[in-house]
Amino acid sequence: MVRTTPVTVAIVSDNALAREGLRRILDGEELTVVESHSSSSGLADLKERRSNPAIVILDIGADHDNAAEVESCQAAMPDAKVVVLTDDFNFEPMLEAFNAGVDAYIVKRIDCEALIESLKLVHLGEKVMPSELARGFPSRWSGNSLPSMPDREVISELSDREIETLRYLILGSPNKVIAGHLDISEATVKVHVKAILRKLGVQNRTQAAIWAVNNGIELSQPDIVPASQSNVSKLETKSGAAISR
């Protein structure tokens, strides 16, 4: 049997018990904790780093600045995936975290096995979002703070490829993942995204995704499925975690 190299993980939490608990949960054949710090500054303090974690788990409290913590982690370890672990689901902090570039936003109510599976999906390039996000769509995305619904004529201005790209924006997919699915270059994806933002009159990918949902752009396309359906089914069954590319 071929043994795979464990995915290396760094834990950042100001709670010593939480750090030790996460270490015990994650350490195994598939994941291994190689660093543990009380703050994100600890990642940058290591002048001669012996490890190079693939994933940084950022345990954020309600009174923390999500974007600042994420940016600090990214500055210290630009190649690592960043996962936010939070006590409760709050829409605005979650939005700030994803805008700052996180790869997952996980509520601590998730069970241990689902957490491990989520981290493995993150390592493969997936985005992981809490199930509370889906449950909040009807009320959250009908507010005045969201882009207004333009005429249906706007949809007719989008090319087929731009609509395909827009579907992946709803899922939070990075350009590299979109390029792989559509069999185009990342540069071409960037061109499509810029065209989408311009035609919809929105400022960023998040607003474009909200516009798409409000205007009936559906995800039920055969090519938009997770790489491992078994993993997704397991996560949905155990924790209700929403997985997106």
Image: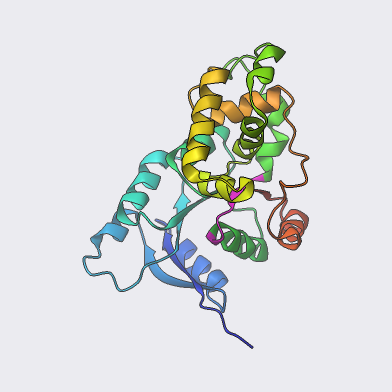
Q: Nearer the viewer, residue 86 or 231?
A: 231
The residue sitting at 60% across, 59% down in the picture is: 121
Quarter of the picture containing the N terminus is bottom right
Residue 148: name its quadrant: top right
Q: Nearer the viewer, residue 16 or 53?
A: 53
Residue 142: x percent and y percent? 67, 20
Q: Is residue 112 above or below residue 244?
A: below
The residue sitting at 70% across, 38% down in the picture is: 134
Residue 110: name its quadrant: bottom right
Instruction: Say whether residue 151 is magenta.
Output: no
Instruction: Say whether residue 125 is magenta.
Output: yes
Residue 128: x percent and y percent? 60, 50
Kindly give the residue lying farthest to the bottom in the view shown: 1
Q: Is residue 197 visible?
A: yes
**Horizontal side of residue 9 vs 37, given as left or right:** right
The residue sitting at 63% across, 49% down in the picture is: 181
**Horizontal side of residue 112 vs 82, given as left or right:** right
Residue 189: x percent and y percent? 52, 39
Q: Nearer the viewer, residue 221 or 63?
A: 221
Kindly give the residue lying farthest to the left in the view shown: 47
Q: Is residue 95 above or below residue 23?
A: above
Residue 143: name its quadrant: top right
Q: Which residues are magenta?
A: 123-130
Residue 160: x percent and y percent? 68, 31
